Image (cartoon, rainbow, N blue to C red):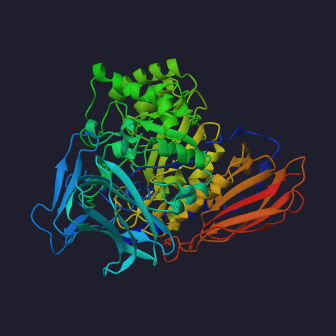
Amino acid sequence: MTIKNAIACLLTLTNIALMNAAHAQQKRLVVDADHIIAPIQPTMWGVFFEDINFGADGGLYAELVKNRSFEFTKPLMGWKTGGARLAEGSVLVVKGDNPKNPHYIRVTAADGGLWLTNEGFRGMGIKQDVRYSFSVMYRQTQPGIKLHVTLIDPQGKALGGAGLSPEGMGWQKDTVSFIAGRTEPRASLKLDIEGAGQIDLDMISLFPGDTWKNRPGGLRSDMVQWLADMKPGFIRFPGGCIVEGFNLDNRYQWKKTVGPVEDRQVEINRWNIEFAHRPTPDYFQTHGLGFFEYFQLAEDIGAEPLPILNCGMACQFNSAELAPIDDIAPYIQDALDLVEFANGDTTTTWGKLRASMGHPASFHLHMMGVGNENWGPQYIERLKMFTRALKTRYPDVRLVNSSGTDPEGNRYDFLNDTLRAMHADLIDEHYYRKPEWFFANARRYDNYPRSPSHVFAGEYAAQSDHTVSVDNQNCWLTALSEAAFMTGLERNAAVVSMASYAPLFANADAWQWTPDLIWVNSLQSYGTPDYYVQQLFSLNKGKAVVPLTLDGQSVAGQDSLYATACLDERDLIIKVVNASRAQATRVITVDTRKRLGPGTLTVLQSDDLNAVNSFDQPARVAPREMPFIPKGRTLTLAMRPYSLNVVRVPLQ
Ligand code: AHR
């Protein structure tokens, strides 16, 4: 954390403490456990996934070879060629006639002495004793070449490898596997060309065997585990601005991401060129993690799938290209076809494709977003056309609509008013703001109209410095401020149906945007303090909100406390944030006809608001659970400074 950030943190908390000094004498907290205010939707706490910060390629998608199909703008980016017999023309990039995957390389050898290496995504993370599966598509034009694949460390020492003898004519796919003898975070793949002949190579690929659910060509298991451990109510994908693209050609098109991986069109990632201060020229989307895999991931982690589709508008911060209204039909058709792909009978065109990919059963799509951070009357005009078509054909699919980029201002006011007048199902609000904003907005929804539209807090993260600053940190202050704000979301579950922190993942060696919920490198991953806040809220979601008051008022800043209470089938769950630097002991009276049993107290805390987690100290700020015993119908809660406290006691 920079000095600037540290001072900002201190000022924030000092202000809050002063603001609340007047309330310091008020101490009576009461939970009315027999009086339900509102149900809490199962979707309340979810996750937002976007391919930003190498979140998909180089992240969740476990492929280790970068530019496996030679489709980057520079077709040999990530690759090196060499060897004693390397000559002009030994390795050529050829453009073939498959429009989805046009490029391959043609290798000509007289007597071996040639090699290619691939550097992976800032080095390949290789684990001892794990089996690696190498695959390649080849076409022998002059048979006689054999291939030998080796994983090597930065000094060129072998970690494991295997040979492959091409057979047959025409394009073929072959796979060999081997076990790595050593762990190495920055390995590369070496492909030795042996013998004499000519061969075309494409889709040169390497996957670890220990993917999530051991699926071939699957996802990185440690990263999925972080999501599964949150038990999220939904997963939003594929973004974010990536949905919009920097222009319409670059927009995310789900149909290009399904079917055999070799036929999924590679697309430049919009974050490749977004920030001059964080250039990532090697950032592309293979779409190996495509819409089928997103739906499958949602199913695996028990989350409702929430795809967001382009509405005929490119990113309004970039080209702001618009599809003319007369040309909008294909965009709407993509949305209609997506419902068929997810839910349709296997006799339908898109349902059949889903079945052919290994999932005949429905993915149970119930929600879809139209547009990401789009705004203005042009958005409304297009949205109305999408809504008419989707609601006519699929009246039960709930639609998420954009309220733009900011939680206030003219654009927001226009969209919020217009969308409510249109009876939008869900309005997506985004808040990238300072921690002070999050503390100050714990009451944002207290007086919001409860109908006709519900709120989806679709992207939020406290910025310790400012939005898109490289100095932003996932420190304990940001997490604590989000926890305070989230008590307000939960208390207002009558209008807030969904919420997700954004962005989700960042590769520490290749990020563009910070803060992020979970950080990874080639071998490790850790959850930030913000992650643990999200996890605690999600694991303690409850089914219905009950009143928790301090002298008759909801608790949103008095005495530096922020609190909410809810019930699930069995338990009363109370979440209290103590944002003061002093310990706070409070007696909470529970009004109920039932008896309170012994339960647990989970505490997320640090005395240091600047504390961060890291690869070396992944659990510096992490939850600690302890037994908690009520006395009759009172709970005495001794809250440590700067803490989130979650009490869970059975009602018997
Ligand atoms: O989360 C990062 C970006 O922030 C998203 O892509 C966009 O929707 C928002 O501006």
Q: Residue at x 24, y 64 (%)?
A: 79
Q: Position of residue 7 (x, y in %)?
A: 43, 70
Q: Nearer the viewer, residue 531 or 448?
A: 531
Q: Quadrant of the N terminus?
A: bottom left
Q: Position of residue 263 (x, y in %)?
A: 34, 42
Q: Nearer the viewer, residue 80 or 610?
A: 80
Q: Is residue 406 above or below residue 193?
A: above
Is 384 situated left or right of 250 in this image?
right
Q: Is residue 27 visible?
A: no
Is 202 situated left or right of 56 in this image?
left
Q: Nearer the viewer, residue 167 or 421?
A: 167
Q: Residue furthest left?
A: 88
Q: Nearer the viewer, residue 286 or 97?
A: 97
Q: Is residue 481 visible?
A: yes
Is 29 situated left or right of 603 in this image?
right
Q: Is residue 399 above or below residue 60?
A: above
Q: Residue at x 56, y 74 (%)?
A: 620
- The image shows a total of numbered marks equal to 0
Q: Position of residue 309 (x, y in %)?
A: 41, 35
Q: Residue at x 21, y 55 (%)?
A: 105
Q: Position of residue 378 (x, y in %)?
A: 33, 27
